[in-house]
Image: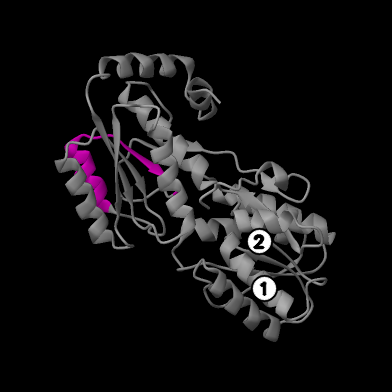
Amino acid sequence: MTLLKKLRTFGITTMAVAAMATGAAKAAEDEIKIGMVNLSLCCAYFVGMDEAVKDEAKPYSNIRILSTDAGGDVAKLTADVEDLLNQNVKGLIVSGAFIEAAPAALDAIQQAGVPVVMVDRLLKGGDYTSWVGPDNRVIGEGIGDYIVKRLGGKGKVVIIRGGPADNTIGSDRSDGVKAKLAEAKMDAVVAPGWGGWSADGGFKQMEDMLAKEKDINAVFCENDSMCLGAQKAIHDAGRDSDIFVAAVDGEMGALEEINRDGSNYGATGLNSSDQIGRAGFNRLMAILAGAAVPQKTALASPIITKDNAIKFINEDSKF
C-alpha cells in the first residue's frame, strides 16, 4: 500500500495529505524528533504498537523516533515525557497501557505547546491533540452478538475480566457483551477474580469457574491472552466439545486457534496494536504538517471467526 493510500485509510483527507507533503518538503533538511512514550512494554501487544510506530516512520529519512518504557510506573512516564520535551521533540505519541490518567504528564506536554496523539488508551484528566484507538464497547457488543447467535439465545456464559476494577477498556468490552446477553435473557456469570490480562491468569480463573459452575456453554475473556489460558483449562478438564471461548484483540495465537479445524476458540474482535501504532504515527505527521484532524478516531474492529481468520493471520506480527 502506498503512503498516500495509508494516510487515507487512517482518515486523513486529500487536503491534509497535501499539507503533509508541503510541510515535509520544508523540513526535508532538518531532523524531526518524535517521542513514543510507553507506560509499559510488558507484553507483545504494547511492543507491537511501539514497533509499528518505528516501522511506519522508516520512509521518512529525517524522522527520528525516541522510544521510552516507564515499566508501568506513572511517575517514570511523566519523567520520560519531561526528558523528551527537553530534547525538543516536535510531537509525542503516548501509549497509556493500563492506567486511566496521567495528568502531570499531559500538563507538561500542554505547557510545552507540543502536539500529543494518544493511542489505544484515552487518558483522562488532561488536554490532548488527538486520539486513535478501538471502540471497546462496540467490540464487546459484536462478540456478544456472536455468542448469542451461536448459542441460539440459550445457555450460560462465563466472563473473565482483566482488571483492575477501574480499567475502562476491559469494562467497556464486558459491558458490551453483557448488554447483548441481557437482550437475549441469557445468563452471564462474572468470575470474581482478575485474570491479569495473562494466559496464566485466564487459566486460573477458568479452573476456578469450572469447579464452581455447572452447565457452562461459553466463555468471554476481555483479551485473547486470558482466553488462550482459559481454553487450556477447558481442555485439561475434557470440556472442549461443551464450551467455546471468545475474546478481543486478534493476537496471532488466538487467530491460529480460531483457524484450526476442530478448535473451540470461536471468535475475537480485532484490536490491532500494529494498526493503532501506524494510525497514531500518521495522525501526528498530519498534525505537524498543519492539517486539521479529528480529535477522536475509533478504528474499525471486525469480528474474526473461522470464516475470515485467514485474512488476518500474519506470521511476522509482533503480537
Left or right, 318 with respect to 227, comes to left
Answer with left or right where residue 41 lies relative to residue 67: right
User: What residue do we see at 54% from left, 74% from top?
Assistant: 201
Residue matched to label 1: 232
Q: Position of residue 11 (x, y in %)?
A: 50, 27
Q: Nearer the viewer, residue 171 or 90?
A: 90
The residue that appears at 56% across and 68% down in the rendered structure is 161
- Residue 187 on image: x %, y %: 73, 69
| Residue 282, visible in the rendered structure | yes
Residue where numbered disc 2 is placed: 178
The residue carrying pointer 1 sits among few (fewer than 14), some (14 to 19) or many (20 or more) residues within 10 Å by Cα, namely some
Q: Which mark is residue 106?
A: none
Q: Residue furthest right?
A: 152
Quadrant into which the N terminus falls = top right
The residues tagged by marks 1 and 2 sit, at their Cα atoms, a distance apart of 24 Å
Q: Which residue range is magenta in the image?
A: 103-120
User: Which residue is at 20% across, 34% downward?
Assistant: 113
Comparing marks 1 and 2, which lies closer to the viewer? 1
Residue 131 visible in the displayed image: no
Q: Residue furthest bottom?
A: 211
* Mark before the other along the chain sequence, 1 or 2: 2
Q: Amino acid at mark 2?
A: Lys
Where disc 2 sits, the SS reads: helix
Residue 206 image offset from top left, x and y in percent: 64, 76
